[in-house]
């Protein structure tokens, strides 16, 4: 049951074991484009796995900082109070690279870069690269995806 993320199309596809499309979601990848280097703000390419699922049972719009729920629920007023926050909401699927020297270990390690698939405020556009490297999704979509995939699911990120 792999996930295929297209940076060019700003889409995430969930496939079954035979490669049949189960569902498709709009996403937002990095404003800085594709790239693996630590500190680049880019979305890493290649083969990954979901290393951890964080946020099961949290409320729609639950705010996370450092992968921990803050107890806050995103709202326009909260966004106004913290205008510089990179909002990580609702659920987190933490990615780990599988290709040594490409997206694993050294200065290109996806997991050490804290690259996630996560929810974002529904006021943020999808289909437009705007993230700091992560793959942003609508909150309802990230809940749906979270409930469909186990830890260890393969994630292919392609240009």
Image (cartoon, rainbow, N blue to C red):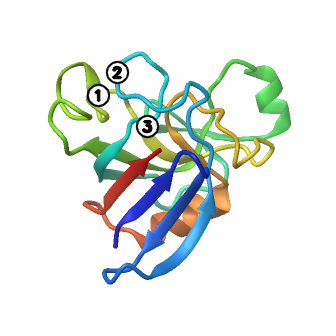
Q: Which numbered tag is attached to residue 112?
A: 1
Residue 106: quarter of image: top left
Looking at the rendered image, the disc whose residue lies closer to the viewer, 1 or 3, is 1
Where residue 79 appears, as percent x and y from the top left, is 77, 29
Q: CA distance from mark 3 to mark 2?
A: 21 Å
Q: Which numbered tag is attached to residue 37?
A: 2
Where residue 37 appears, as percent x and y from the top left, is 34, 21
Q: CA distance from mark 1 to mark 3?
A: 13 Å
Q: Which residue is located at x 56 percent, y 32 percent?
A: 30
Of 81 and 157, nearer the camera is 157
On screen, residue 153 versus residue 118, left or right, reads left
> Relative to 137, is 86 above or below?
above
Dots 1, 3 in contact, CB < 8 A: no
On screen, residue 28 versus residue 49, left or right, reads right
Q: Residues within 10 Å of mark 3 (few under 14, many from 20)?
A: some
Q: Does dot 2 land on a helix, a strand or a loop?
A: loop
Where residue 146 appears, as percent x and y from the top left, is 47, 63
Q: Does dot 1 land on a helix, a strand or a loop?
A: loop
Where residue 62 appears, as percent x and y from the top left, is 62, 47
Q: Which residue is mark 3?
A: 67
Looking at the rendered image, the disc whose residue lies closer to the viewer, 3 or 2, is 2
Mark found first going from the N terminus, 1 or 3: 3
Q: Quadrant of the N terminus?
A: bottom left
> Relative to 101, is 92 above or below?
below
Q: CA distance from mark 2 to mark 1?
A: 11 Å
> Relative to 76, is 10 above or below?
below
Dots 3, 2 in contact, CB < 8 A: no
């Amino acid at each position: 049951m792999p996930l295929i993320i297209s940076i060019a199309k700003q889409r995430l596809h969930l496939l079954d074991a035979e490669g049949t499309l189960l569902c498709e979601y709009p996403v937002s990848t990095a404003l800085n484009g594709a790239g693996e280097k630590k500190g680049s703000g880019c979305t890493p390419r290649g083969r990954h796995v979901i290393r951890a699922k964080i946020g099961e049972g949290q409320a729609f719009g639950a705010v996370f900082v450092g992968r921990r729920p803050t107890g806050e629920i995103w709202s326009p007023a909260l966004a106004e109070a913290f205008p510089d926050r990179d909002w990580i909401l609702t659920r987190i699927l933490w990615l780990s690279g599988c290709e040594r020297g490409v997206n694993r270990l050294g200065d290109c390690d996806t997991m050490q870069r804290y690259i996630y698939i996560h929810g974002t405020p529904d006021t943020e556009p999808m289909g437009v690269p705007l993230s700091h490297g992560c793959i942003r999704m609508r909150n309802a979509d990230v809940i749906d995806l979270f409930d469909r995939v186990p830890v260890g699911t393969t994630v292919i990120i392609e240009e």
